[in-house]
Image: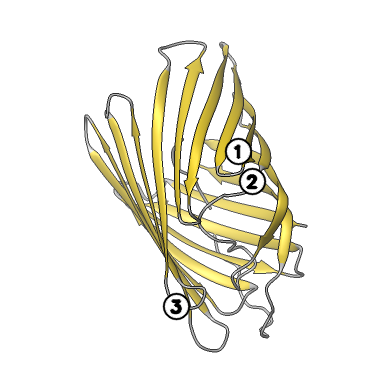
Amino acid sequence: MKFKILAALVLASSSTMAAESYRSFSNLSYADNDYGDITLINTRYYLADQETLGPLDETGYLDTDTNFGGYFSTTDNVDNVGVDAEVFFGRFLVGAGYDYSDTDFSDSDTFSASVGYLMGDNIKFKVTGYDPEYGDSYFIFQAQYVHKLEGVDYLGFTFSTDDDTDLVSLSSYYFAALQNSQYVKAQLDMVDTDYDTYWSARGDFYFNAMTSVYLGADDNDNYTAGAQHYFTRNWAVAAEYVNNTDDSDASTIQARLTAQF
């Protein structure tokens, strides 16, 4: 449960678009850096329509519908695969997950189970227990809150901590519609551990519902620039470049194909 990676495309059509709705979201991405490459496939399916708020990749902050997901990633010496599900019974939710990792030297797996509760349509509590094959079991406690502003605009917050409070994280998220069918999005994450405190930030600008660019930075001197474009309402491509200013040779280029139906 940590951080990720993506380099720049551009341009596209404009036009005012009505809200779209989807049930499945899938990605195929490939990243290459100085230490190797990684291929990742992930997918998620919802039992209810997920309506966009304008941009085709923005469907709101809270997951409040039953969903199932999975992923597979591979590098030169590590393969990872996982599946998970979150099922809602009214305002209550139960979930389960399984992750398996296979390296050149060993393999291991982790089982997880979660319970949660929705308070109204803007607060979500969840507790997830993890049972790794190696190491001690632990719990993650999470609280999410979304504050709706004018129109589709909103502020979102997520607070998480483990059962020993050795790891505490706070994420804030802002989405807003501008004039001429343009949008902005900003995210700031803070993670506090027993050893240090880390931050990361990212800002997105949408020229329209189908085309966006973004910039990001983090506490480890990583700087990111990327772009995304939907060629149709179902298919998008994205590219990203990440450079670490502590070491000019440390850079990552990633390309991604997205499918939504």
Q: Would residue 109 appear left or right of 237 to someone viewing this image?
A: left
Label whose residue precedes the other's in the sequence (2 or 3): 2
Q: Position of residue 230 (x, y in %)?
A: 69, 68
Residue 8 visible? The answer is yes
Q: Residue at x 28, y 24 (%)?
A: 164
> On the image, which quarter does residue 208 sit in?
bottom right
Q: Would residue 80 appear left or right of 190 to someone viewing this image?
A: right
User: Which class describes the residues within 10 Å of circle 1: few (<14), some (14-19), or many (20+)?
Assistant: some
User: Which class describes the residues within 10 Å of circle 3: few (<14), some (14-19), or many (20+)?
Assistant: few
Q: Residue at x 59, y 31 (%)?
A: 95
124 in relation to 161, above or below:
below
SS at circle 1: strand
Residue highlighted by disc 1: 38
SS at circle 3: loop
Q: CA distance from mark 2 to mark 1?
A: 6 Å
- 4, 173: nearer the viewer: 173
Q: Position of residue 206 (x, y in %)?
A: 54, 75
Identified by mark 2, the residue type is Tyr
58 in relation to 104, above or below:
below
Q: Residue at x 61, y 24 (%)?
A: 98
Q: Nearer the viewer, mark 2 or mark 3?
A: 3
Answer yes or no: do the residues labelled 2 and 3 have beta carbons within 8 Å? no
SS at circle 2: strand
Identified by mark 1, the residue type is Ile
Answer yes or no: do the residues labelled 2 and 1 have beta carbons within 8 Å? yes
Q: Position of residue 134 (x, y in %)?
A: 47, 10
Residue highlighted by disc 3: 150
Q: Position of residue 188 (x, y in %)?
A: 35, 56
3 in relation to 77, above or below:
below
Q: Residue at x 46, y 56 (%)?
A: 122
Label whose residue precedes the other's in the sequence (3 or 1): 1
